[in-house]
Image (tube, coloured by chain):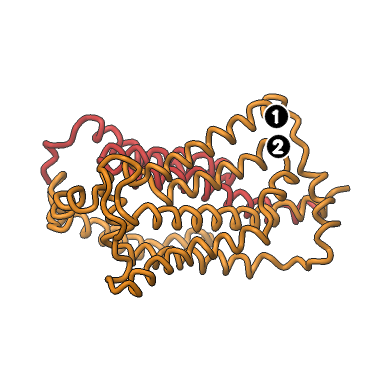
Amino acid sequence: MIVANIVPLQALIFVLVPLGATAVVLCRNPLRQIVVNGVYGLLLSILFFVLQAPDVALSMLVVSTIAYPLIVLAAIARSRTKPEEDE
Amino acid sequence: MRRDQIRGLIALPFLVVVAGLLVWSVVDLPDFGKYRGPYGYVLNRVAVPQRHTSNVVAAIVFDYRGIDTMGEEFILFASVAGVVLLLRSRGEEEEPEEADEAEEVVDAIHSDMLRVLGPLLVGVTLLVGLWLVAFGFVTPGGGFQGGVVVAGALLLVYLTTSYRAWRKLTREVFLDPLEASGVGSFAILGLATLIAGAPFLHNFLGPGTTGTLISGGSLPFLNLATTIEVAAANIVLFSEFLEQYVRPLAGSDE
């Protein structure tokens, strides 16, 4: 693979994206994981933007910051309220 | 051996296979920055002269591959219909009482900062969403992204004011037909071109001036139909999930 035509900004984001993905996987607390996943989504958006795909970046941004967290949060809230009632 | 150790042992060969497949999929990729598909080069060259949209992606999504987008619209519509079918179990007659109970619990926003800045945020987000929609075929953006942002702006109403305000904005009797009309008008625009004797989803109305809002022919209408569908679908989705969130809260109120 020829990597000569990668600009520094791209190289930086290529390093950050796998780090973000690993952070999401290593996060064990679901609530914290959503926030970390949002940061990871932002990193992916920057990756797409840096690779000159602003439309994909925007899609990634809206899905990872609006649609996805809300649905996961609601699901967590739903599954958590049951045991609390028993306490 | 402990249970998770056995699990790890079972998972190991599969993980090795997956890792191997991943590596295999990457080794034969074209070099970085090299693009082998001729289709992209052709579209980059012809889209602006043919469709007068400075955002080529919009020309592809709403014109050259418009029928794909229509398929995606219907996928979204069908999946939201599925969610509604599964989650909207509440009987009509018990709605008011239950909703009131829920509202009292969730309406507790104590931060003055949120109360003051919240409505401002809603306005700004809504404006960004509408801008993404309106200029979707001139600059990056479009019906999908703009639609989700518009839905997000309404969601901020819930986050910064109250569940009651959110419920007022998201009446099912209004939103369900709106969503259907979004996806339906996409199909109707396609059928109208068929009746007129042109190919399905053929671009009509003339190209207009490149780089302005009056460009792209009938493409902006498909963009608008997508916006209505995506925004309404997301709001319906959010309200169904929020209700799932709110209902147990109301139940556990001591």
Q: Mark 2 points at which residue?
A: B161
Residue in view at x 57 percent, y 52 percent? A72
Q: Which of B61 and A63 is in front in this view?
A: B61
Q: Could you tell me how many numbered marks the image carries?
A: 2
- x, y (%) of residue B62? 33, 57
Q: Left or right of B253: which side holds B1?
A: left
- x, y (%) of residue A59? 40, 47
Q: Mark 1 points at which residue?
A: B115
Q: Measure the C-alpha gap from mark 1 to mark 2.
A: 7 Å
- x, y (%) of residue A41? 43, 43
Q: Which chain is orange?
A: B
Tell which circle, 1 or 2, labels the residue nearer the N-terminal end.
1
**Label 1 crowd (10 A; few <14 / some 14-19 / many >=20):** some
Q: Is mark 1 on a helix, strand or loop?
A: helix
Badges 1 and 2: C-beta atoms under 8 Å apart?
yes
Q: Which chain carries label 2?
A: B
Q: Is mark 2 on a helix, strand or loop?
A: loop
Q: In which quarter of the image is residue B108?
A: top right
Display colour for chain A: red
Identity, as a three-letter code, of the amino acid under mark 1: Arg
